[in-house]
Image: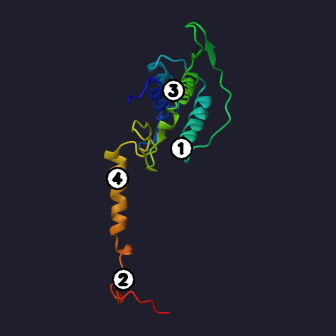
């Protein structure tokens, strides 16, 4: 399965914030305008874009994001003989893409990396939709190494100054 243009647009929008690097394309109007122009979209007001991003991140599982009830203008076109969502501004385009992903049953594939220091959005292309890391080579590997170190730490071993009873009997 290949990620669609809709998935790419939604994931790109969710990743306008980079937790690991401390960057945010919605931090100022110039960065936001650049992001929208690169995609051929009109820029919505910055506070509205931030609110929508926060709500979408919450909807796909970011534990640090807060959902909000949003009212967004979307248009429906009937030029091709079929109804289609249409949008002229960036936020409406992202939300129209999210709706199309939902209709195609692909919305659950948009996820947030479980690494708390990453939280990068990604589109899960695995057959069983079970991917949890944005990258197995980076975040997944880092988390597996951390878990292995925890299991091997001295605090997880039996104390050496205590006798071990391997007889299987229980004393009460």
- If the image is split into quadrants, where does the N terminus sit? top left
Is residue 137 shown left or right of residue 28? Answer: left
Q: What residue is pinned by disc 4?
A: 142
Mark 3, secondary structure of its residue: helix
Nearest to viewer (mark 3 / mark 2): 2
Is residue 58 shown left or right of residue 114? Answer: right
* Callout 3 touching callout 2 (CB < 8 Å): no
Residue at position x 36%, y 49% in the image: 140
Q: 10 Å neighbourhood of mark 1: few (<14), some, or many (≥20)?
A: some
Q: What residue is pinned by disc 1?
A: 61
Q: What residue is pinned by disc 3?
A: 32
Residue 56, image x and y in percent?
57, 36
Nearest to viewer (mark 4 / mark 3): 4
Nearest to viewer (mark 4 / mark 1): 1
Q: Which is more N-terminal, label 3 or label 4?
A: 3
Looking at the image, which is closer to me, 94 or 49? 94
Mark 1, secondary structure of its residue: loop
Q: What residue is pinned by disc 2?
A: 159
Q: Which is more N-terminal, label 1 or label 4?
A: 1
Q: Which is more N-terminal, label 2 or label 3?
A: 3
Residue at position x 63%, y 40% in the image: 67
Q: Which is more N-terminal, label 1 or label 2?
A: 1
Q: 10 Å neighbourhood of mark 2: few (<14), some, or many (≥20)?
A: few
Q: Which is more N-terminal, label 3 or label 1?
A: 3
- Distance from disc 3 to disc 2, alpha carbons, whole Å, reads 57 Å
Residue 90, image x and y in percent?
54, 22
Residue at position x 52%, y 27% in the image: 104
- Distance from disc 2 to disc 1, alpha carbons, whole Å, reads 40 Å
- Distance from disc 4 to disc 1, alpha carbons, whole Å, reads 20 Å
């Amino acid at each position: 399965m290949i990620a669609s243009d809709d998935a790419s647009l939604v994931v790109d929008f969710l990743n306008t914030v980079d937790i690991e690097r401390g960057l945010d394309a919605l931090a100022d109007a110039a960065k936001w305008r650049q992001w929208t122009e690169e995609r051929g979209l009109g820029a919505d007001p910055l506070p509205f874009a931030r609110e929508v991003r926060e709500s979408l991140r919450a909807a796909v599982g970011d534990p640090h994001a807060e959902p909000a009830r949003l009212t967004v203008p979307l248009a429906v076109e009937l030029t091709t003989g079929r109804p289609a969502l249409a949008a002229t501004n960036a936020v409406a385009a992202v939300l129209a893409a999210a709706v199309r992903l939902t209709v195609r049953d692909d919305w659950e594939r948009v996820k947030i990396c479980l690494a708390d220091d990453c939280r990068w959005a990604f589109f899960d292309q695995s057959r069983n939709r079970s991917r949890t890391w944005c990258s197995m080579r980076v975040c997944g590997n880092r988390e597996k190494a951390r878990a292995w170190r925890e299991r091997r730490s001295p605090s997880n071993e039996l104390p050496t100054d205590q006798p071990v009873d391997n007889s299987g009997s229980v004393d009460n």
